[in-house]
Image: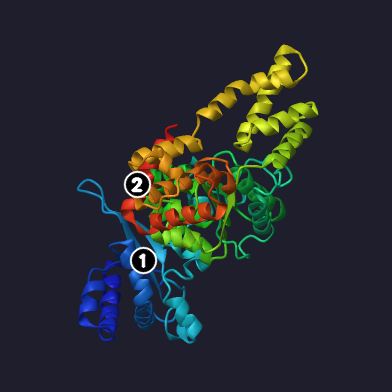
Amino acid sequence: MLKDCRTVWANCLRVIKATIGEQSFRTWFQPIVPVQLHNNILLIQVPSTYFYEFLEEHYVEELKRAIHQELGPDGRLEYSIVVDQGNAQQKPRTLNLPTARKSAGPAASSTPAATAMATSAMTASARNVAAASVAPAPTPATLRNPFEASKTIERDYLKSQLNTTYTFENYIEGDCNRLSRSAGLAVANKPGTTSFNPLMIYGGVGLGKTHLVQAIGNHIKATNTDKFVLYVSAEKFTNQFIESLRSNQVQDFANFYLLVDILILDDVQFLSGKDKTQEMFFHIFNHLHQAGKQIVMTSDRPPRDLVGLEDRLLSRFKWGLTADLQSPDFETRMAIIQNKMQQDGIDIPPQVVEYLAHSVNTNVRELEGVLISLVAQSSLNRREIDLEMAKQALRHIIEEVEAEVNIDFIQKTCAEYFSVPLDLLKAKTRKKEVVTARQVAMYFAKEHTSHSLKSIGHHFGGRDHSTVIHSVQTVSDLIDSDKSFRSTIIELRKKFAGR
């Protein structure tokens, strides 16, 4: 078998060498190692993901033509990509992936559209998920389930990991979330077929990101019972991948995620700085997206601010729709409280409801926590909920909110960091160092507080909302283009995160 695969590959190399330059041949084809020939599929090992992508983008037609000539029209090519070089005690770890299209030979590239498809890296590799392994593709029942390590996978009984209490019916709509909710409902009704693929929902802590994306998953499950919907946090995804490396089951890990019809990845910012995990997610993303599967993600910040994620991932995040969640306004907070009262059968006087909605203006989670606290106190003390009880319950929360990051703290921190007088942040001066400090402070004020753009401008010497928008955009652009400036933002963000 080994001799056959070497012979076939040697013959392929002769065909390819006749069509490309000597230098290109030495660089891109001599390092390739033939691994196995099985069921008319030739498996070749390449040294890296970049190597694989370059071959797929620039030499896929030459490869397929050679395979077709050696193995016939049904011949196929697959790659074994080295994802971990290993060491003296451990062999390198590899991941097997198919070439861009299942078929080989001239017939496969007879039209311009087909040629364009072939020369785009991994353009249609997920159309045949069963081709993800060089041996006969493992059936779901033979794969290890990363969510239940002791069990193999049974396709009909895969768990979605969703919380069934998160639905669109109990997700209160307001100006703060209308776009995100509408986009989520569109995706839930037609997963994988809208232009919102991927759908990225971003926003601060406690604003309802997890509720919304799980509502999408629950709606799809209810209306498309044949679809495999999977919710997973980026942290769990990372831990599963690390475990698959440790147990030498990377291929099983990849194949499991290729079974998914709707992938919901929560807190994608957790992948920051984790290069190998990002590489795996990149391949999974490509396969699912090209197969018409739906991808939904959440983040605590917009894609442009996700420092530590590879550009190729960030560019894919922007293929679909990115929508944000804002802090709920007063009317939405009132509606959230009333909905919770109705759900749980709680009776709260109108003046108390209004007081709560006015006082807790940070996020939904905080608001619901206050309600739980009130109900507990009412039950334990055997007394009706009234305004005095509400004030007592909120006393420590309001103190905590005041201790959190506010505009005054942001201004003071930025002024000290950039070594400019604090009062100049509110003055009319256009000195470069002051302007930079002011713009960065406005950027963090928008990121860390619930103040409106108009309110932020007011805190900076009465500037209008358009000035705030310009400042935020300027800082965002510099984060993308200036590595030194990006480091500055990371340092400052750590100062605010510690509050």
Determine the image quadrant of residue 205: top right
The amino acid at mark 2 is Thr
Q: Helix, strand, or loop for circle 1?
A: strand
Residue located farthest toward the top when viewing the structure as drawn: 381
Q: Amino acid at mark 1?
A: Tyr
- 4 vs 219, left or right, is left
> Which residue is outermost to the front?
428
Mark 2 and mark 1: Cα distance apart in space:
41 Å
Nearest to the observer: residue 166 or residue 130: 166
Disc number placed over residue 79 in the picture, else none: 1
Where's residue 435, x and y in %?
Answer: 40, 51
Position of residue 269 measured from the top left corner of the image (x, y, whole percent): 45, 47
Q: Is residue 472 visible?
A: yes
- Count the numbered circles shown: 2
In the rendered image, the vertical position of residue 224 relative to residue 362, given as above or below: below
Residue wearing tag 2: 488
Is residue 255 visible in the rendered structure shown here?
Answer: no
Mark 2 residue crowding within 10 angstroms, few (<14) / some (14–19) / many (20+): some
Q: How far across and how far down the image is residue 270, in percent?
A: 44, 45
Element carrying mark 2: helix
**Where is 117 relative to 136, above or below?**
below
**In the picture provided, is 80 more to the left or to the right than 322?**
left
Location of residue 199 by image quarter: bottom right
Quarter of the image with the C terminus is top left
Q: Position of residue 6 (x, y in %)?
A: 26, 72
